[in-house]
Image (cartoon, rainbow, N blue to C red):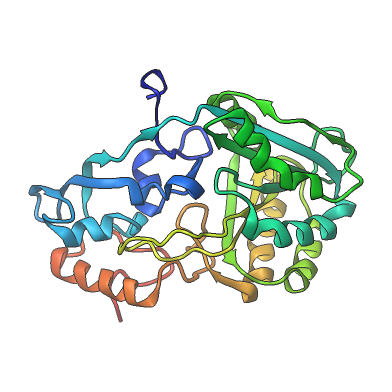
Protein backbone atom coordinates (compact mmCIF):
# COMPACT_ATOMS: atom_id res chain seq x y z
CA UNK A 1 0.00 0.00 0.00
CA UNK A 2 2.87 2.38 0.74
CA UNK A 3 3.98 2.17 -2.89
CA UNK A 4 0.49 3.31 -3.89
CA UNK A 5 0.45 6.00 -1.19
CA UNK A 6 -2.36 4.24 0.66
CA UNK A 7 -2.80 3.47 4.33
CA UNK A 8 -4.72 1.23 6.73
CA UNK A 9 -4.59 1.40 10.56
CA UNK A 10 -2.67 -1.85 11.12
CA UNK A 11 -1.57 -3.18 14.51
CA UNK A 12 1.31 -1.62 16.41
CA UNK A 13 3.34 -4.85 16.59
CA UNK A 14 4.84 -7.11 13.97
CA UNK A 15 3.20 -10.49 13.72
CA UNK A 16 -0.29 -9.27 14.60
CA UNK A 17 -2.60 -11.44 12.53
CA UNK A 18 -4.93 -9.24 10.50
CA UNK A 19 -7.92 -11.54 11.00
CA UNK A 20 -7.81 -11.46 14.79
CA UNK A 21 -6.92 -7.76 14.76
CA UNK A 22 -9.98 -6.82 12.70
CA UNK A 23 -12.37 -9.17 14.49
CA UNK A 24 -11.62 -7.94 18.02
CA UNK A 25 -11.78 -4.24 17.16
CA UNK A 26 -8.34 -3.32 15.95
CA UNK A 27 -6.97 -0.12 17.43
CA UNK A 28 -3.79 0.46 15.45
CA UNK A 29 -1.55 3.15 14.05
CA UNK A 30 -3.57 6.32 13.39
CA UNK A 31 -6.83 4.81 14.68
CA UNK A 32 -7.60 7.94 16.68
CA UNK A 33 -7.90 9.73 13.33
CA UNK A 34 -9.27 7.14 10.89
CA UNK A 35 -11.08 4.81 13.27
CA UNK A 36 -10.72 1.29 14.54
CA UNK A 37 -9.72 -1.45 12.14
CA UNK A 38 -13.18 -3.02 12.43
CA UNK A 39 -14.83 0.29 11.54
CA UNK A 40 -13.00 0.13 8.22
CA UNK A 41 -14.26 -3.34 7.30
CA UNK A 42 -16.70 -2.75 4.46
CA UNK A 43 -17.70 -6.40 4.02
CA UNK A 44 -16.55 -9.96 4.64
CA UNK A 45 -16.72 -13.33 2.91
CA UNK A 46 -17.20 -16.09 5.45
CA UNK A 47 -18.03 -19.76 5.97
CA UNK A 48 -20.81 -20.19 8.52
CA UNK A 49 -21.49 -23.06 10.88
CA UNK A 50 -23.48 -24.79 8.13
CA UNK A 51 -20.40 -24.88 5.88
CA UNK A 52 -21.76 -22.42 3.31
CA UNK A 53 -19.64 -19.59 1.88
CA UNK A 54 -21.44 -16.27 2.03
CA UNK A 55 -20.87 -12.53 1.71
CA UNK A 56 -21.81 -10.16 4.54
CA UNK A 57 -22.17 -6.38 4.36
CA UNK A 58 -24.58 -3.73 5.65
CA UNK A 59 -27.12 -4.91 3.06
CA UNK A 60 -26.42 -8.67 2.92
CA UNK A 61 -26.27 -11.03 5.90
CA UNK A 62 -26.06 -7.87 7.98
CA UNK A 63 -26.18 -9.71 11.31
CA UNK A 64 -22.93 -11.55 10.59
CA UNK A 65 -21.39 -8.30 9.39
CA UNK A 66 -22.42 -6.69 12.70
CA UNK A 67 -20.93 -9.59 14.69
CA UNK A 68 -17.68 -9.70 12.72
CA UNK A 69 -16.85 -6.13 13.74
CA UNK A 70 -15.94 -6.72 17.37
CA UNK A 71 -16.80 -10.33 18.29
CA UNK A 72 -13.13 -11.31 18.32
CA UNK A 73 -12.46 -14.92 19.37
CA UNK A 74 -16.19 -15.43 19.91
CA UNK A 75 -17.05 -15.02 16.21
CA UNK A 76 -18.96 -18.03 14.89
CA UNK A 77 -17.64 -18.21 11.35
CA UNK A 78 -14.46 -18.54 9.30
CA UNK A 79 -13.64 -15.36 7.40
CA UNK A 80 -12.00 -16.00 4.05
CA UNK A 81 -11.79 -12.40 2.85
CA UNK A 82 -12.01 -8.89 4.32
CA UNK A 83 -13.03 -5.93 2.17
CA UNK A 84 -11.35 -2.86 3.67
CA UNK A 85 -11.58 0.92 3.46
CA UNK A 86 -8.17 2.45 2.65
CA UNK A 87 -6.97 6.03 3.16
CA UNK A 88 -4.38 8.37 1.67
CA UNK A 89 -1.09 7.68 3.39
CA UNK A 90 -0.01 10.39 5.87
CA UNK A 91 2.87 12.31 4.34
CA UNK A 92 4.79 12.76 7.60
CA UNK A 93 5.34 9.98 10.14
CA UNK A 94 7.57 10.16 13.20
CA UNK A 95 7.72 10.52 16.96
CA UNK A 96 8.94 12.64 19.85
CA UNK A 97 10.25 10.88 22.99
CA UNK A 98 11.30 11.64 26.54
CA UNK A 99 12.94 9.37 29.13
CA UNK A 100 12.41 9.55 32.90
CA UNK A 101 13.27 7.57 35.99
CA UNK A 102 10.31 5.77 37.59
CA UNK A 103 10.39 8.35 40.40
CA UNK A 104 8.44 10.62 38.03
CA UNK A 105 5.51 8.20 37.68
CA UNK A 106 3.00 10.34 39.56
CA UNK A 107 3.91 13.50 37.65
CA UNK A 108 3.62 11.76 34.29
CA UNK A 109 0.30 10.08 35.11
CA UNK A 110 -1.20 13.39 36.22
CA UNK A 111 0.17 15.19 33.16
CA UNK A 112 -1.04 12.50 30.71
CA UNK A 113 -4.47 12.54 32.33
CA UNK A 114 -4.65 16.34 32.09
CA UNK A 115 -3.55 16.74 28.47
CA UNK A 116 -5.09 13.51 27.16
CA UNK A 117 -8.51 14.82 26.05
CA UNK A 118 -6.88 17.62 24.03
CA UNK A 119 -4.14 15.60 22.30
CA UNK A 120 -4.76 15.93 18.53
CA UNK A 121 -6.10 12.76 16.86
CA UNK A 122 -2.94 12.57 14.74
CA UNK A 123 -1.05 11.50 17.91
CA UNK A 124 -1.22 8.44 20.15
CA UNK A 125 0.30 9.66 23.40
CA UNK A 126 1.60 6.74 25.44
CA UNK A 127 4.18 5.87 28.04
CA UNK A 128 5.85 2.64 29.01
CA UNK A 129 7.33 1.63 32.38
CA UNK A 130 10.12 -0.95 32.27
CA UNK A 131 13.45 -1.87 33.79
CA UNK A 132 15.07 -1.34 30.39
CA UNK A 133 14.51 2.27 29.35
CA UNK A 134 17.27 4.10 27.43
CA UNK A 135 19.42 6.47 29.50
CA UNK A 136 17.86 5.22 32.78
CA UNK A 137 19.46 3.03 35.47
CA UNK A 138 16.77 0.90 37.08
CA UNK A 139 13.02 1.23 36.41
CA UNK A 140 12.23 4.01 33.97
CA UNK A 141 9.50 5.60 31.92
CA UNK A 142 9.56 6.27 28.19
CA UNK A 143 7.02 8.85 27.00
CA UNK A 144 6.28 8.47 23.30
CA UNK A 145 4.23 10.71 21.03
CA UNK A 146 3.97 9.10 17.57
CA UNK A 147 2.44 11.40 14.99
CA UNK A 148 1.02 10.75 11.52
CA UNK A 149 0.25 14.02 9.76
CA UNK A 150 -0.11 15.54 6.31
CA UNK A 151 2.77 18.02 6.68
CA UNK A 152 5.79 18.66 8.86
CA UNK A 153 4.19 21.92 10.02
CA UNK A 154 1.06 20.07 11.16
CA UNK A 155 3.24 17.54 12.99
CA UNK A 156 5.13 20.29 14.84
CA UNK A 157 1.87 22.08 15.69
CA UNK A 158 0.19 18.91 16.94
CA UNK A 159 3.21 18.04 19.10
CA UNK A 160 3.25 21.42 20.84
CA UNK A 161 1.58 19.95 23.95
CA UNK A 162 4.78 17.96 24.62
CA UNK A 163 6.37 21.22 25.80
CA UNK A 164 4.18 20.96 28.89
CA UNK A 165 5.51 17.53 29.94
CA UNK A 166 7.03 17.24 33.43
CA UNK A 167 10.55 18.47 34.01
CA UNK A 168 13.34 16.14 35.01
CA UNK A 169 13.68 13.98 31.91
CA UNK A 170 17.10 12.34 31.54
CA UNK A 171 16.87 12.80 27.80
CA UNK A 172 14.33 14.14 25.31
CA UNK A 173 14.35 14.08 21.53
CA UNK A 174 13.12 16.54 18.94
CA UNK A 175 10.58 15.30 16.42
CA UNK A 176 12.21 12.41 14.55
CA UNK A 177 10.76 11.61 11.11
CA UNK A 178 10.78 7.88 10.35
CA UNK A 179 8.96 5.25 8.38
CA UNK A 180 6.03 3.46 9.92
CA UNK A 181 8.04 0.25 9.68
CA UNK A 182 10.77 1.87 11.79
CA UNK A 183 8.22 2.91 14.43
CA UNK A 184 7.02 -0.69 14.54
CA UNK A 185 10.57 -2.03 14.80
CA UNK A 186 11.18 0.17 17.85
CA UNK A 187 7.97 -1.04 19.46
CA UNK A 188 9.15 -4.61 18.96
CA UNK A 189 12.16 -4.08 21.25
CA UNK A 190 9.66 -4.60 24.06
CA UNK A 191 7.95 -7.61 22.46
CA UNK A 192 10.77 -9.98 21.49
CA UNK A 193 10.32 -13.31 19.76
CA UNK A 194 11.14 -16.57 21.53
CA UNK A 195 9.56 -15.41 24.77
CA UNK A 196 6.39 -16.27 26.65
CA UNK A 197 3.77 -13.70 27.59
CA UNK A 198 1.14 -13.27 30.30
CA UNK A 199 -0.90 -10.15 29.56
CA UNK A 200 -3.98 -8.30 30.73
CA UNK A 201 -5.56 -4.90 30.13
CA UNK A 202 -8.26 -2.43 31.05
CA UNK A 203 -10.11 0.61 29.79
CA UNK A 204 -10.63 3.36 32.36
CA UNK A 205 -11.62 6.96 32.91
CA UNK A 206 -10.55 6.96 36.57
CA UNK A 207 -8.78 9.95 38.09
CA UNK A 208 -5.05 9.81 38.90
CA UNK A 209 -5.78 9.71 42.64
CA UNK A 210 -7.65 6.45 42.08
CA UNK A 211 -5.12 4.85 39.75
CA UNK A 212 -1.81 5.90 41.29
CA UNK A 213 -1.82 3.72 44.43
CA UNK A 214 -2.26 0.59 42.34
CA UNK A 215 0.19 1.72 39.67
CA UNK A 216 2.84 2.41 42.31
CA UNK A 217 2.36 -1.08 43.77
CA UNK A 218 2.70 -2.56 40.28
CA UNK A 219 5.91 -0.64 39.56
CA UNK A 220 7.37 -1.66 42.92
CA UNK A 221 7.04 -5.31 41.85
CA UNK A 222 8.10 -4.78 38.24
CA UNK A 223 9.87 -7.94 36.94
CA UNK A 224 12.98 -7.78 34.74
CA UNK A 225 12.60 -6.48 31.18
CA UNK A 226 11.01 -7.02 28.77
CA UNK A 227 8.05 -7.11 31.20
CA UNK A 228 6.42 -3.68 31.19
CA UNK A 229 3.32 -1.53 31.71
CA UNK A 230 1.75 0.44 28.86
CA UNK A 231 -0.45 3.53 29.27
CA UNK A 232 -2.12 4.82 26.11
CA UNK A 233 -4.24 7.94 25.80
CA UNK A 234 -7.27 7.00 23.74
CA UNK A 235 -9.87 9.70 24.51
CA UNK A 236 -12.31 8.53 21.82
CA UNK A 237 -14.20 11.34 20.17
CA UNK A 238 -15.57 9.47 17.19
CA UNK A 239 -19.11 8.17 17.17
CA UNK A 240 -18.82 4.45 16.43
CA UNK A 241 -21.15 2.66 14.02
CA UNK A 242 -23.51 -0.03 15.27
CA UNK A 243 -21.30 -3.11 15.66
CA UNK A 244 -20.41 -5.74 18.23
CA UNK A 245 -17.38 -3.73 19.35
CA UNK A 246 -18.54 -1.62 22.27
CA UNK A 247 -15.87 -1.46 24.99
CA UNK A 248 -13.44 1.47 25.07
CA UNK A 249 -12.72 4.52 27.19
CA UNK A 250 -10.43 7.49 27.73
CA UNK A 251 -7.34 5.54 28.82
CA UNK A 252 -5.97 2.11 28.00
CA UNK A 253 -3.63 0.37 30.45
CA UNK A 254 -2.00 -2.98 29.71
CA UNK A 255 0.49 -5.16 31.55
CA UNK A 256 2.90 -7.56 29.90
CA UNK A 257 4.65 -10.21 31.95
CA UNK A 258 7.36 -11.51 29.62
CA UNK A 259 9.88 -14.26 30.26
CA UNK A 260 12.16 -16.61 28.38
CA UNK A 261 13.22 -19.14 31.01
CA UNK A 262 10.89 -21.29 33.12
CA UNK A 263 12.45 -20.03 36.35
CA UNK A 264 11.04 -16.55 35.63
CA UNK A 265 7.52 -17.67 34.71
CA UNK A 266 5.84 -17.53 38.10
CA UNK A 267 7.00 -14.00 38.89
CA UNK A 268 6.22 -12.47 35.49
CA UNK A 269 2.88 -14.19 34.96
CA UNK A 270 1.62 -13.55 38.48
CA UNK A 271 2.71 -9.91 38.33
CA UNK A 272 0.54 -9.18 35.29
CA UNK A 273 -2.55 -10.95 36.62
CA UNK A 274 -2.27 -9.60 40.18
CA UNK A 275 -1.52 -6.09 39.01
CA UNK A 276 -4.52 -5.84 36.74
CA UNK A 277 -6.73 -7.43 39.38
CA UNK A 278 -5.54 -4.67 41.75
CA UNK A 279 -6.60 -1.97 39.25
CA UNK A 280 -9.83 -3.71 38.18
CA UNK A 281 -12.16 -1.71 40.48
CA UNK A 282 -11.33 1.35 38.38
CA UNK A 283 -11.89 -0.34 34.99
CA UNK A 284 -14.88 0.20 32.72
CA UNK A 285 -13.99 -2.86 30.65
CA UNK A 286 -11.25 -4.56 28.66
CA UNK A 287 -10.42 -4.99 25.01
CA UNK A 288 -10.27 -8.37 23.29
CA UNK A 289 -6.65 -8.28 22.25
CA UNK A 290 -4.21 -8.51 25.15
CA UNK A 291 -6.72 -9.90 27.61
CA UNK A 292 -6.63 -12.85 30.03
CA UNK A 293 -10.26 -13.95 30.11
CA UNK A 294 -9.30 -17.48 31.09
CA UNK A 295 -7.80 -16.30 34.38
CA UNK A 296 -9.68 -13.01 34.91
CA UNK A 297 -13.12 -12.76 33.28
CA UNK A 298 -14.06 -9.13 32.67
CA UNK A 299 -16.50 -7.01 30.69
CA UNK A 300 -15.40 -6.84 27.04
CA UNK A 301 -18.62 -5.73 25.37
CA UNK A 302 -21.74 -3.77 26.24
CA UNK A 303 -24.35 -6.01 27.87
CA UNK A 304 -26.90 -5.39 25.13
CA UNK A 305 -24.35 -6.21 22.44
CA UNK A 306 -23.27 -9.40 24.17
CA UNK A 307 -26.88 -10.50 24.58
CA UNK A 308 -27.50 -9.86 20.88
CA UNK A 309 -24.37 -11.81 19.98
CA UNK A 310 -25.47 -14.75 22.15
CA UNK A 311 -28.85 -14.80 20.42
CA UNK A 312 -27.22 -14.76 16.99
CA UNK A 313 -24.88 -17.59 18.01
CA UNK A 314 -27.75 -19.72 19.28
CA UNK A 315 -29.60 -19.28 15.98
CA UNK A 316 -26.71 -19.44 13.50
CA UNK A 317 -24.49 -21.98 15.29
CA UNK A 318 -26.99 -24.13 17.22
CA UNK A 319 -24.63 -27.12 17.40
CA UNK A 320 -21.86 -25.01 18.97
CA UNK A 321 -19.27 -25.77 16.28
CA UNK A 322 -17.36 -22.59 17.16
CA UNK A 323 -15.81 -21.86 20.54
CA UNK A 324 -17.24 -19.08 22.67
CA UNK A 325 -15.26 -16.82 24.97
CA UNK A 326 -12.97 -18.07 27.70
CA UNK A 327 -14.33 -17.30 31.16
CA UNK A 328 -18.02 -17.56 30.22
CA UNK A 329 -20.44 -20.07 28.68
CA UNK A 330 -20.62 -20.23 24.90
CA UNK A 331 -24.32 -19.30 25.06
CA UNK A 332 -26.30 -17.07 27.37
CA UNK A 333 -27.29 -18.78 30.67
Occupied quadrant, residue 107: bottom right
Give me the residue at 35% from left, 50% from top.
Answer: 38
Residue 104 vertical position relative to residue 224 in the rendered view, above or below:
below
Which is more toward the observer, 317 or 207? 207
Which residue is painted at 88% across and 42% down in the image? 169
Q: Is residue 288 left or right of residue 266?
A: left
Q: Residue at x 71, y 71 (%)?
A: 207
Q: Could you tell me residue 86's position as x and y percent?
A: 34, 36
In the picture provided, is 247 more to the left or to the right than 308?
right
Q: Nearer the viewer, residue 160 or 3?
A: 160
| The N terminus: image quadrant | top left
Residue 269: quarter of image: bottom right
Q: Position of residue 256 (x, y in %)?
A: 64, 50
x, y percentage for residue 119? 63, 52
Q: Residue at x 37, y 63 (%)?
A: 325
In the rendered image of this protein, does residue 104 appear above or below residue 309?
Answer: above
Quadrant where the image shows the C terminus: bottom left
Amino acid sequence: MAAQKLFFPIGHCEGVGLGGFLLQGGFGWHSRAVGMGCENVLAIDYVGADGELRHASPSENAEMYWAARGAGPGFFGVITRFHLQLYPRPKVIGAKLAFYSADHLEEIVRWAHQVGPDVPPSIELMFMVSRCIPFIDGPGIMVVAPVLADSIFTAWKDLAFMKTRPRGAKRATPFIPMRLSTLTERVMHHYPDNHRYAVDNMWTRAAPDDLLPGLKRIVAKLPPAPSHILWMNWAPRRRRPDMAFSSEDEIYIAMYGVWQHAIDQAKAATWALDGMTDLAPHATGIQLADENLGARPARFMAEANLARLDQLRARLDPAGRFHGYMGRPATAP
